[in-house]
Image: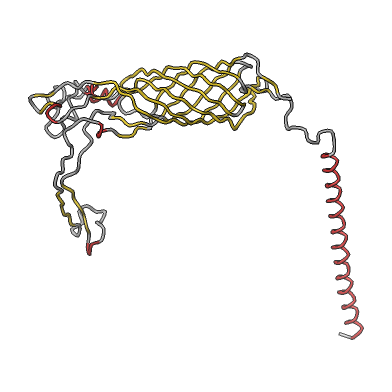
Amino acid sequence: MTRHGEGNVQEGRKGLVIMKRYTLAIATVLALCLATERVHAQEILLEGPLAGAPAVRKLVLYREMRFSVGPQFAYTILNDYMHNFLLGGRIEFNIFDWLAIGAVGYYAVNVTTSLTDHITSSTDIGGSPTSPAESNYPSYTGSGNFEKQVALLKGMYLGQVSLIPLRGKVSIFEKLFMAIDGYIFLGGGAVQYEERQACKKDGCGSWPDNILEPKRVSQFGGTFTAGVGFMTFFNEWLAVNVEYRLTPFKWNAGGTDEAGQSGTQWTCTGTGGRPCSKNEDDPNNKWTTTTKSGGDYPDGNIDSNDQTWNMNQSIAIGAIFYFPLEPSIAD
């Protein structure tokens, strides 16, 4: 290539570089102009008639400084031996639209579960009602007595504080509009239940000649409660609430003997002291036994040591009436 040709190529490259620089400069200027216009628009908005105005005007305060009261119906879930249908009421004072204090009380109606029905109707190979054996008495008192030994939930009496962090409106087919809110609550109180009467050793009877019919006694226990719920307002003074509640407490739900220290324990080790193989037939698995002095499981007593924690989960629905009938309205 001649020197004249090389010069033309260099001039072309130089022109391309200059064009890129001009294009970049123009793009930068345009970006700055657009940013300036956006800033001016924001300044106009902030300095306009809406500057400093609240997000919502004339907000209906459905809760603030109002009492609410109403009936409640609830049902406990994940029941082992008894279904519990809860009938009660709720009262609440709403200090603010987002904070309330109140109380709820329930009376329980008990219905046997399919498990309890199965046990009470069980028969042996000869067709006779099943009876306890030496190995499971006094935990099991026979099919005819089993329903009498399981515990019954009879009532819940709870105080609670509610926080209402969510509120809004819902539309049904764009024709019906209702206010709703979501709340969480935390509190405590007492539960009333009937539990198998405590007995010690011979006081529980003996197998096979002195099998005693179990009796229940009324008990009260402390508890705390927590949950979440939603409130739907159909007008200014009537709402419906739906909520999920936890009310854990300790009781002996089955009336069985659960306490005591294990006497003989089995320990499995594999080759070289490693953990046992999952294959039970592995010849390298070696079992050793350890006997503890005083091992007495089950201990033969029915008492508070046999109680275990029950989460006592429930779902509730109710009607809520607000007073005064007209809510306040924010500015």
Query: On the picture, is 123 further left or further right than 232?
Result: left
Identify the residue at image location x=84%, y=43%.
Answer: 43
Identify the residue at image location x=85%, y=36%.
Answer: 48
Q: In the rendered image, which quarter is residue 41 located in?
A: top right
Query: On the picture, is 292 further left or further right than 181?
Result: left
Q: In the rendered image, which quarter is residue 302 located in?
A: top left
Instruction: Estimate the x, y position of residue 87 in percent, counting from the top left.
Output: 42, 17
Pick the front one: 152 or 81: 152
Quarter of the rendering occupied by the C terminus: top right
Instruction: Estimate the x, y position of residue 298 in percent, counting from the top left.
Output: 18, 37
Q: In the rendered image, which quarter is residue 218 located in?
A: top left
Identify the residue at image location x=32%, y=29%.
Answer: 80
Pick the front one: 290 or 193: 193
Q: Residue furthest left?
A: 209
Q: Residue furthest bottom?
A: 2
Q: How is the image coloured?
A: secondary structure
Picture layout, residue 228 above or below residue 5: above
Instruction: Estimate the x, y position of residue 5 in percent, counting from the top left.
Output: 90, 81
Query: On the picture, is 80 further left or further right than 162?
Result: left
Instruction: Estimate the x, y position of residue 175 in percent, counting from the top left.
Output: 67, 20
Quarter of the rendering occupied by the N terminus: bottom right
Q: Residue furthest right?
A: 4
Q: How many marks?
A: 0
Pick the front one: 222 or 301: 222
